[in-house]
Amino acid sequence: PQGIVTDVAGRLFVADASNNRVSQFTPQGGFVRAFGFDVVPGGGTGLEACTAATGCKAGIDGGGAGQLASPRGVATDAAGRLFVADAANSRVSQFTPQGGFVRAFGFDVIPGGATGFEVCTAATGCKAGTSGGGVGQLATPTAVATDCRGAVYVAEEGDRVQRFGEAGTPPPPCPSGGGGGVPSNEFSFGKVKKNKRRGTAKLTGIVPGP
């Protein structure tokens, strides 16, 4: 396992690089499901979700839509989106929490498309991205994270981090009070309570939530 994250619903996701799949667990460690290509024994050859009832096996690596090749990082956001840093495919893939493929982005990820930054879907088909150092191009993405604005941050082995989602605009402030499932760091002070006899004073800090 290379990466792990818990979403706002308490679901635990693990990027299982050697098995070319993502596994989901309960906060207590109970197995829920895993998804990847051909992970159900005796099943089909496309994107599948396996459970304890069906049994599971290692996924088949490759560049198809929803297919994973050495996934190394995983992240979720407040909207329930699940992002996977697909290292060997030089792209980031987005899934639903149940393992349904939504899209992937990277350089030249659409078969027969252009050679720049692209977003592929099941409708367009997908292939492995072209590794490199261009703007928006990914070279062995190893970790992914999101913020309360919906931006996606991707760390690469090539010693850089890129931000996706707000092209050409400065990042707006996060909503007051945290928002987006992110705890707030705002606080206020209560009244000072003096104890003249002891020569002490007590000042209470007030936070909006846990």
Image (cartoon, rainbow, N blue to C red):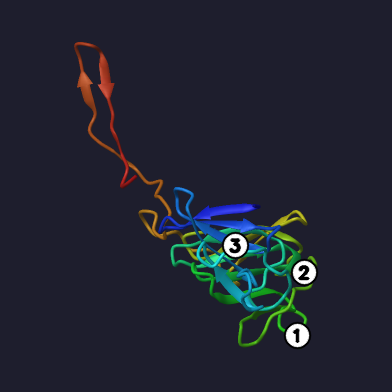
Mark whose residue sits in front, 3 or 2: 3
Q: Earlier in the sequence, mark 3 or mark 1?
A: 3
Residue at the image position 20 percent from the left and 17 percent from the top: 195
Q: Which mark is residue 51?
A: none
| Residue picked out by circle 3 | 22
Q: CA distance from mark 3 to mark 2?
A: 28 Å
Q: Amino acid at mark 2?
A: Gly
Q: CA distance from mark 1 to mark 2?
A: 14 Å
Q: Few, some or many C-alpha atoms within 10 Å of disc 2 (few <14, some 14-19, many ≥20)?
A: few
Along the horizontal axis of the image, is 145 left or right of 127? left
In the rendered view, would you say 98 is above or below 179?
A: below
Q: Amino acid at mark 1?
A: Ala
| Residue picked out by circle 1 | 114
Q: Are marks 3 and 1 in contact (CB under 8 Å)?
A: no
Q: Amino acid at mark 3?
A: Val
> Where's residue 189, x and y in %?
29, 37
> Where's residue 27, x and y in %?
45, 50
> Where's residue 131, x and y in %?
79, 68
Along the horizontal axis of the image, is 45 left or right of 77? right
Q: Secondary structure at mark 1?
A: loop
Near-viewer residue (22 or 189) = 22
Near-viewer residue (17 or 79) = 17
| Residue picked out by circle 2 | 134
Q: Quadrant of the C terminus?
A: top left
Query: Which of the 4 image quarters holds residue 86?
Result: bottom right
> Where's residue 44, x and y in %?
63, 79
Q: Earlier in the sequence, mark 3 or mark 2?
A: 3
Q: Earlier in the sequence, mark 1 or mark 2?
A: 1
Residue at the image position 63 percent from the left and 68 percent from the top: 39
